[in-house]
């Protein structure tokens, strides 16, 4: 029997519980090995250890020290988790059957709450990506400082490539080093903002970061980070809204290599104040590779009608040799630009003397300055305003960069796409200035729609959308040839891996153009004549069964997220071929019967054999999607083929059900192969989750699927991963993606026995004992679709608590390196909560809210526009509305869910007050309205009233 859980000390008022013992983290640095995609991602490290290379530039721990956090705190700090665990223990595992969750904590899962904010020590680890998508990685710190600055094409593993030891085990970036020891602010060059305030004879000079203000509050609602600065006795309050333009459905507008720092200054006193807000930038060209004898730094001030810019670049020194230095080819050859919008701007290309805050009015204002590489060259811009009591004024800066010499994955992929749009960083900022009103308004409008025009809990919105920021990290690239390309996590496992990326729902829903790009420029470029899709975009030289099904399912989603049939018509040949490859796999042991049996490489980096529930589940979903696409393409023969196999499969998969959940039917010819056998596996019914998102309905036995989800909750949800990990030998405990008091859903358990000791010789076995957020989100979203709302919310909130800012960076979910793509499965949880279904070409839209349907509102994104959906359920009627905030929406069919006990009597539909004739049908609690196609334009509103008895 497993050991009893350690006692915990709990605070009933907060629901927080402290573990008696933390895991032992030894801070020791070692070298980093590279992933080898040909042998499987993330094999164990081996070889001699040595100290890692020192990072070029400046690494500063002063923020951490100021907040009272030492290195020991880095390793061991953590908020207590609000879950306690007592009850029956599974044999061999310390997983309680009765989760004994705190009732108040459970209640908080459903509550709207207030916007989440952080102060004090909780600011230290925050790093919200605020660069453009696929344009380099810049963090916004909890104090409003821009940091990390991974824009120089370094190509390293993780945000920081340190390695540590946990209980004697090596932990690299891909293993979670930046999870167990979160990084804090570091910056390779000097950049910042400050404010000077005068009120009568009293003057204040404050940097806009932790050095200048003591009272700082961070509110993160990606894509916008909001920081409030105020101090006792200071007559002004400053609010920063930092972001890179982010407009759903508009990749160009959302992929600037730039960050906007929009400051609002308010006079909170009773007398007039004069303020000067300044920003400065140190020349960072050739930051890593510069040579003093070869490079000369140059700063220039450029004045425009609407703005003033400081341009920081580099020239080849007159005594330097282009041939020797290869100036143009260096990865950090480029330039940066600081732009201040407006007029009456003070500017200098170079400071006369160094000061913590650079105010150009105090300096001799130079228009041009040069220095040899190695000498700091820092310039600045400022604007002065006068504020009467209660008055507010806004000042906006743009920080842009231009380092196009990307060389990724062993020089296989080159260049950044922004080099095709702009010639330098100044052109980037100039374009933003020219389009500032639209970019600013639309970005803030989307943040308002998603977070404020919603009835869903703030914590839930933060967690389900935060991972969309992965697109703005060095996980993702838009290459100079126009292709989208990505790692699994930063610097680890190349090729936009199909068996990882098909979990990531955010990109396909927010920027569907990028997923279409992946299908057309990668998957269907490497597809073979038999339909096999190389799961690493030509790098793996083989298929992955789950990723192959994912290509089909994603293709159907991409079709649905368009306004017409162009994508499907263009790519049907390849989609059909990819599905046929799975059908041929199914037929390898005889007739295709919906039960693939042979070798199946999958996302756990191994070949499994036999009938595997997750693969079959995904295959059945792909068959159903294929059937629907074939119908739309008038491909009657293929539609019938899919339907026939699907019918067999939906019955045959029941043979894998053991009375509680689905298990693997192992192939006796491959006894040495790893698998799940009789285990309760996290993805066992994954295909049904996909089917719900695509509006495909029920795939197979409802009772069996729901019982399997119940089993996952019962056997795999661990309220205290620290205790769970301590019950296992360290070599089998898996990577530390959840430690100490963290809670989570582990990958696989064997509650009924049947785990083979022989499996432990496989390095992949450790995966089974891990918590990986992308898998957890997939299961949580499915639970919500199946009305297991408490379980789904609990799993999602457990992840949210693991990534509380007091523990680590809330925006860096780790699995096989930082900002791991699979984590974008979180957006699928959001879709489930909304009950959102959409088919653009068919002009169909559906909502079936799972949380508070009696008074619900949330944002949605369709093919050509985005807005809000709202509904109120009353005793005798349900009122709903769809409002477009941006773009347009063409529909001719809407499906809504009414209370199960009600029957509709009359349905009325109005567009901006004009009645729309409609017919409706009912199926259980679903009401489907059909009408002639209408277009809802920007700011227009469609209302639906369903009277029922």
Image (cartoon, helix red, strand yellow):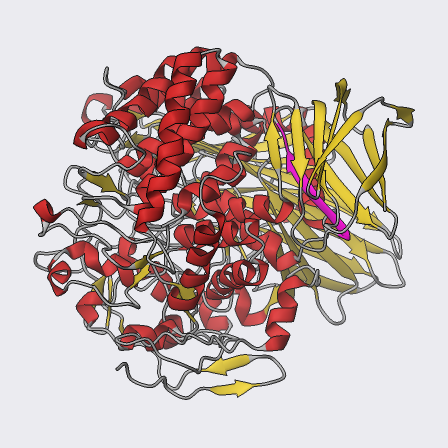
Name the quadrant of the N terminus: bottom left
Kindly identify the residue that appears in the image at 29 percent across and 43 percent down.
Answer: 491
6, 302: nearer the viewer: 6
Q: How many marks?
A: 0
The correct choice, above or below, for 685 with respect to 59 in the image is: above
Instruction: Name the spot of residue 734 as percent of width and height, x first.
Output: 25, 63
Image position of 569 with respect to 498: above or below: above
Q: Is residue 417 visible?
A: no
Percent x, y for residue 473? 43, 42
Q: Is residue 429 above or below residue 806?
A: above
Q: Is residue 457 left or right of residue 311?
A: right
Residue 177, image quadrant: bottom left
Residue 939 visible in image: yes
Residue bounds of the magenta highlight: 854-862
Q: Main secondary structure of the magenta part?
A: strand
The reply, left or right, for residue 99 in relation to residue 522 is right
Nearer the observer, 767 or 887: 767
Q: Which of 385 and 126 is in front in this view?
A: 126
Q: Is residue 860 magenta?
A: yes
| Residue 393 drawn in magenta | no
Camera-side residue: 562 or 276? Answer: 562
Percent position of residue 270, x then y:
89, 63
On the image, the x and y values in percent for residue 21 come to 35, 84
Q: Is residue 644 left or right of residue 678?
A: right
């Amino acid at each position: 029997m497993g050991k009893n859980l350690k006692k915990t000390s709990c605070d009933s008022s907060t629901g927080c519980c402290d573990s008696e013992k933390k895991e032992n983290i030894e801070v020791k640095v070692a070298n980093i090995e590279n992933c080898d995609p040909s042998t499987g991602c993330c094999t164990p490290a081996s070889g001699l250890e040595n100290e890692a290379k020192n990072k070029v530039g400046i690494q500063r721990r002063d923020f951490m020290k100021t907040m009272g956090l030492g290195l020991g705190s880095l390793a061991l700090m953590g908020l207590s988790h609000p879950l306690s665990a007592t009850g029956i223990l599974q044999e061999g595992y310390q997983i309680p059957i009765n989760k004994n969750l705190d009732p108040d904590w459970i209640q908080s899962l459903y509550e709207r709450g207030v916007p989440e904010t952080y102060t004090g020590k909780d600011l230290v680890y925050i790093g919200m990506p605020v660069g453009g998508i696929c344009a380099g990685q810049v963090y916004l710190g909890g104090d409003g400082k821009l940091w990390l600055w991974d824009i120089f094409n370094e190509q390293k593993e993780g945000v920081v490539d340190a390695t540590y030891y946990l209980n004697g085990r090596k932990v690299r970036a891909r293993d979670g080093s930046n999870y167990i020891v979160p990084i804090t602010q570091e910056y390779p060059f000097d950049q910042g903002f400050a404010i000077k305030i005068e009120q009568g004879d009293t003057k204040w000079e404050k940097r806009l970061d932790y050095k200048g203000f003591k009272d700082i509050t961070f509110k993160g609602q990606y894509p916008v980070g909001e920081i409030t600065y105020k101090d006792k006795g200071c007559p002004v309050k400053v609010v920063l809204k930092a972001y890179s333009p982010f407009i759903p459905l508009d990749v160009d507008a959302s992929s600037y290599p730039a960050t906007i720092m929009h400051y609002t200054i308010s006079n909170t006193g009773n007398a007039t104040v004069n303020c000067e807000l300044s920003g400065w930038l140190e020349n960072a060209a050739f930051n890593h590779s510069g040579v003093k004898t070869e490079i000369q730094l140059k700063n220039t001030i450029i004045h425009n009608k609407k703005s003033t810019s400081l341009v920081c670049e580099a020239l080849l020194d007159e005594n330097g040799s282009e041939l020797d230095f290869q100036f143009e080819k260096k990865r950090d050859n480029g330039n940066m630009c600081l732009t201040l919008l407006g007029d009456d701007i003070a500017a200098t290309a170079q400071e006369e003397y160094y000061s913590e805050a650079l105010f150009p009015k105090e300096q001799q204002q130079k228009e041009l300055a040069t220095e040899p590489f190695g000498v700091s060259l820092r310039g600045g811009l400022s604007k002065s305003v006068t504020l009467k009591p209660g008055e507010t004024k806004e000042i906006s800066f743009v920080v842009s960069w231009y380092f196009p010499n990307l060389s990724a994955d062993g020089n296989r992929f080159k260049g950044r796409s922004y080099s095709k749009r702009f010639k330098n960083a100044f052109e980037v900022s100039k374009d933003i200035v020219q389009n500032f009103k639209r970019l600013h308004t639309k970005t803030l409008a989307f943040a308002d729609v998603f977070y404020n025009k919603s009835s869903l809990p703030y914590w839930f919105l933060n967690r389900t959308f935060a991972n969309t920021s992965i697109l703005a990290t060095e996980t993702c690239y838009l290459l100079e040839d126009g292709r989208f390309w990505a790692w699994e996590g930063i610097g680890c496992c190349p090729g936009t891996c199909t068996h990882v990326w098909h979990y990531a729902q955010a990109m396909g829903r927010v920027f569907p153009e990028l997923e279409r790009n992946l299908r057309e420029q990668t998957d269907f470029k490497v597809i073979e004549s038999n339909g096999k899709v190389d799961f690493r975009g030509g790098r793996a030289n083989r298929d992955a069964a789950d990723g192959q099904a994912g290509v089909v399912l994603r293709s159907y989603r991409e079709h649905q997220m368009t306004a017409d049939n162009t994508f499907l018509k263009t790519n049907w040949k390849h989609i059909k071929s990819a599905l046929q490859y799975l059908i041929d796999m199914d037929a390898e042991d005889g007739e295709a019967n919906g039960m693939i049996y042979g070798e199946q490489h999958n996302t756990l980096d191994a070949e499994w054999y036999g009938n595997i529930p997750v693969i079959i589940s995904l295959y059945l979903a792909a068959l159903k999607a294929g059937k629907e696409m074939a119908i739309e393409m008038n491909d009657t023969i293929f539609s019938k083929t899919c339907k026939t196999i699907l019918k067999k499969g939906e019955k045959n998969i029941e043979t894998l059900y053991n009375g509680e959940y689905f298990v693997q039917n192992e192939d006796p010819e491959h006894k040495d192969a790893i698998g799940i056998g009789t285990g309760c596996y996290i993805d066992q019914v994954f295909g049904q989750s996909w089917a719900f998102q695509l509006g495909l309905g029920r795939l197979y036995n409802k009772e069996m699927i729901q019982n399997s989800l119940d089993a996952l909750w019962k056997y795999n949800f661990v309220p205290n991963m620290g205790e769970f990990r301590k019950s296992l030998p360290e070599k089998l405990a898996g990577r530390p993606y959840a430690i100490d008091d963290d809670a989570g859903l582990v990958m696989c358990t064997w509650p009924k026995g049947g785990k083979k000791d022989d499996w432990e010789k496989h390095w992949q076995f450790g995966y089974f004992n891990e918590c990986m957020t992308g898998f957890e989100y997939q299961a949580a979203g499915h639970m919500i679709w199946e009305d297991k709302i408490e379980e789904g919310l609990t799993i999602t909130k457990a992840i949210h608590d693991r990534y509380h800012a007091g523990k680590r960076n809330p925006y860096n979910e780790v699995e096989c390196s930082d900002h791991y793509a699979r984590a974008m499965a979180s957006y699928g949880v959001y879709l489930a909560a909304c009950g959102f279904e959409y088919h653009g070409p068919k002009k169909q839209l559906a909502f079936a809210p799972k949380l508070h349907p009696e008074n619900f509102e949330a944002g949605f994104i369709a093919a050509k526009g985005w807005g809000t959906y709202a509904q109120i359920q009353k005793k005798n009627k349900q009122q709903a509305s769809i409002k477009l905030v941006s773009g347009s929406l063409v529909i001719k069919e809407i499906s809504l869910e009414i209370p199960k006990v009600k029957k509709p009597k009359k349905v009325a539909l109005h567009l901006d007050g004009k009645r729309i004739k409609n017919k409706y049908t009912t199926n259980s609690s679903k009401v489907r309205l059909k009408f002639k196609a209408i277009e809802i334009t920007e700011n227009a509103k469609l209302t639906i009233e369903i009277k029922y008895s």
